[in-house]
Image (cartoon, grey):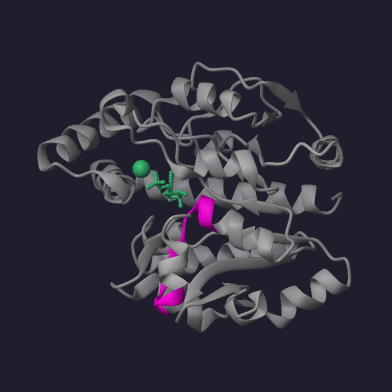
Amino acid sequence: MSLNEYLQISDEVKSALNGGKPVVALESTIISHGMPYPRNYETALLLESTVRECNAVPATIAVLNGKIKVGLDNEEIEILASSKNIYKASRRDLPVMVSKKLNAATTVAATMICANLASLKIFATGGIGGVHRNARETYDISADLTELSKTNIAVVSAGVKSILDIGLTLEYLETLGVPVIGFNTDEFPAFFTRESGYKVNYRMDSEKDIADMIRTKWELGLNGGLLIANPVPLEYSMDKDEIQSAINKALKKADELGIKGKEITPFLLSEIKDITSGKSLEANIKLVINNAKLAAGIAAYL
Ligand code: PSU
Ligand code: MN
């Protein structure tokens, strides 16, 4: 089978690509496994409308009935938001999802792969996966990191959550040759908060500078992605101690229940939401919207 039989690009995305209009890829694991229904559905639509308001075209990505879909309609987003039997697909899962004609939400890694198949350049999400705190024993290091080392997509995120070991995640990104750029910040953000105690490699304050650097990387033949770290807006950032205590409680519970592998991130997100009485979810939504805006801004110069 040819690639075109696996890949379905929506008409809106196709005509944007043909017309040279900026396109922003969006992931779907955040919809199916990152937020509860119906806030996940509302957020997915809000992300798409935000990208459109910023004069770019959104391309939400998922696998439906084994087709890699780049650009979804609202009905398809509703399925991803409300169905209970949606797989979480990273790089290793994609061939199974496609050949067995399954429904799957794509992680950052899988979304990068699919976006690249459709020739997209930039992707907005909330937080990427990384090196887990106990990785010395568990070897749990997200495939998002290795994907960033090889697939030519720029990823805008609000950093990583401190459910992960942020320091080790940044070390690993360095080993893999992935540039980490802070937008308007010297410090790498920790998702719910603007500070993590770790610096970014480079700070850039303009969307055009970031786009120039992305283009330069690829023109130099330096394949692989980049991580653009965009801190949560100040008015939505959470109290550091409150979120840290929630994360610690959630990690302890996961450990007691023996949750691991691909289940751990969705479990922790849902626990943290409950412990903070939903406050973490509100911050999560606001920061993803903020990332979609920045991605659309950079896309205009790419
Ligand atoms: N981190 C978050 N929110 C998320 C995810 C990570 O703060 O929704 C999702 C993303 O889709 C990411 C995936 O790609 O979890 C990473 O999963 P794993 O650690 O199993 O690779
Ligand atoms: Mn993992």
Quadrant housing the N terminus: bottom right
The residue drawn where x is 45% and y is 57% is 30
Q: Residue furthest left?
A: 256
Return the x and y of residue 165 as percentages of the image width and height: 39, 25
Q: Is residue 238 left or right of residue 208?
A: left
In this rendered view, identify the residue nearer to me: 287 or 5. 5
Is the residue 89 above or below the residue 41 in the image? above
Residue 262 visible within the image: yes
Is the residue 168 above or below the residue 48 in the image? above
The residue drawn where x is 19% and y is 44% is 259
Return the x and y of residue 45 as percentages of the image width and height: 55, 69
Q: Is residue 163 left or right of residue 230?
A: left
In this rendered view, identify the residue nearer to me: 88 or 33. 88
The residue drawn where x is 41% and y is 68% is 96
The residue drawn where x is 38% and y is 58% is 35
Q: Which quarter of the picture shows residue 32?
A: bottom left
Return the x and y of residue 7 as percentages of the image width and height: 62, 75
Q: Is residue 207 one of those drawn in magenta? A: no
Residue 9 visible within the image: no
In this rendered view, identify the residue nearer to me: 262 or 46. 262
Q: Which quarter of the picture shows residue 101?
A: bottom left
Magenta stretch, residue numbers: 99-110
